[in-house]
Image (tube, rainbow, N blue to C red):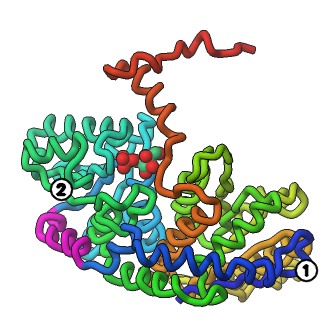
Amino acid sequence: MLKFDFTNLFSERVFDNITIEDVKNYEEKINKIANEIDKNKPGFAEIVFSRKWIDSVLDLKDFIFEFDNLVVLGIGGSALGNIALQNTLKPFNWNFLSKEERKGKLKIFVIDNVDPDYVASILDTIDVNKTLFNVISKSGSTAEAMSNYLIARGIIETYGLDPKKHLIFTTDPEKGVLRSIANKESIRTLEIPQNVGGRFSVLTPVGLLSAYAAGIDIEALYDGAKNAYKKLLNPLFENPAALIALTHYLYYNKGRNISVMMAYSNKLYYLADWYRQLWAESLGKKFDKDGNKVKVGQTPVKALGAVDQHSQVQLYNEGPDDKIITFLKVEKFKRDIKIPHVHDEEALSYLQGSKLSTLLNNELLGTENAILEHGKPSLKITFPQIDELHVGEFFMTYELATVIAGSLFNVNPYDQPGVELGKKITYALMGRPGFEEYKINPSSERIEL
Ligand SMILES: O=P(O)(O)OC[C@H]1O[C@](O)(CO)[C@@H](O)[C@@H]1O
């Protein structure tokens, strides 16, 4: 199980520290929230107690493993989970390994933007004949996913290939243009459960297909998620999701409106990336559930240790008291490197003979303690090792924490009305019928210096 260390959040060395008493005052409220969540189990929790979603992916086994590449086309919640799973659970050189080295599993590419340089360079590297394109969109209409689908489809057709054999859609069971194309053309599909929103969908077929194709143990991911869910009704001090939510809420109310997740692991950095969307879209809201204008939200920031010690930590230590920091630590790395003894220089002797993992984790300790000495709050989550069990546990812990935080802030964690206007203006600029009223004149709005 993951280890959660909240000690430094309560330390008197944090100048505006919250106390155990502050937290205890919320015990009843949190119990009520947790019971409510358990009673009306959210879709993202319900799925891990069913075999349906795993089985829907396992059923595709024969089809998937005929290919060499899987290219995911999606954005936001339809991509970030895939990116997190691949980068945390597969080696960074995975796509450079031979088919034998990959034991027949697929190379995975996730195209989650419409930057032409980026899209073209990924498409350049794949052999379309050996490629399955997985178009993922809950709404089945997002411009970025749809345009990349159209490009992929154009390539498939240019190669004279059968689209049905090279495409699979992951989308809403009934709604959206992807679903209607699939119905018309008998294209294979996977369902995104209707009661699971995009940013909560990593453990639905959205994330499961590419994970399975790359050889990730998707059953163990579910086991980890279930382990996390089981703690939801624990007493507050044994309930990591509730403590994360509550401590972030309490510090937000003290002006700490930035939540930094600093991973001391290149792999776990991608979990911080996934967390950013979850925390930002779920909790950044103009109105509360009663319709009052509240404009709340804690800005999630990702950081990488030790890299960002040489970029961000100056600010974290000495800058404004507006941050709460979560460190992610790995106890046992999959690989380790011993720093060789090369020079008889005294200045290098502390490094030579020691392991990179020891250096990295001591750097974490250094930063964690320095942050505390500067009076700033932090918590630490330790992965005994990076594997499916712990990553599944992490996803579920943070999904629950987000929903609990939503209740504390009294906002709806499942909607994202604030992203609509930008989409509508884009549609208008692209000439989509029905959106004319949103057309702006970009040049007349600009202030030229
Ligand atoms: O899966 P879809 O419907 O294409 O949406 C992609 C993303 O777009 C948003 O709706 C808005 O950014 C996200 O909430 C969502 O994850």
Mark 2 and mark 1: Cα distance apart in space? 54 Å
Whole-percent x and y of residue 397? 52, 76
Front position among marks 2 and 1: 1
- The residue identified by callout 1 is 12
Q: Residues within 10 Å of mark 1 (few under 14, many from 20)?
A: some
Q: Is mark 1 within 8 Å of ligand 1?
A: no
448 sits left or right of 316 in the view: left
The answer to whether the beta carbon of the residue marked 2 is less than 8 Å from any atom of ligand 1 is no
Give residue 65's mark: none
Q: Give me the residue at 25% from left, 74% from top.
A: 54
Please name the amino acid that badge 2 sits on. Answer: Thr
Q: Residue 123 at x, y = what percent? A: 32, 44
Report the residue at 52% width, 16% height from top: 440
Q: Which mark is residue 189?
A: 2
**Element at label 2:** strand
Residue drawn at (91%, 78%), measured in percent from left and top? 13
Q: Residue at x 66, y 43 (%)?
A: 293
The stretch in magenta equals 51-66
Examine the rendered structure and indicate whether residue 78 appears above or below residue 216: above
Q: Residue 220 colored magenta?
A: no
How many other residues sit within 10 Å of disc 2, few (<14), some (14-19) or many (≥20)? many
Work out which quarter of the rendered image holds the C terminus and state it: top right
Q: Is residue 350 left or right of residue 403?
A: right
Instruction: Name above or below for residue 285 compared with residue 245.
Output: above
Q: Position of residue 379 (x, y in %)?
A: 72, 76
* Residue 64 counted in the magenta span: yes
Relative to residue 379, is residue 278 drawn left or right? left
Could you tell me the amino acid type at mark 1?
Glu
- Decide whether the magenta segment is chiefly helix, strand or loop: helix
- Does residue 244 lie above or below 66 as drawn? below
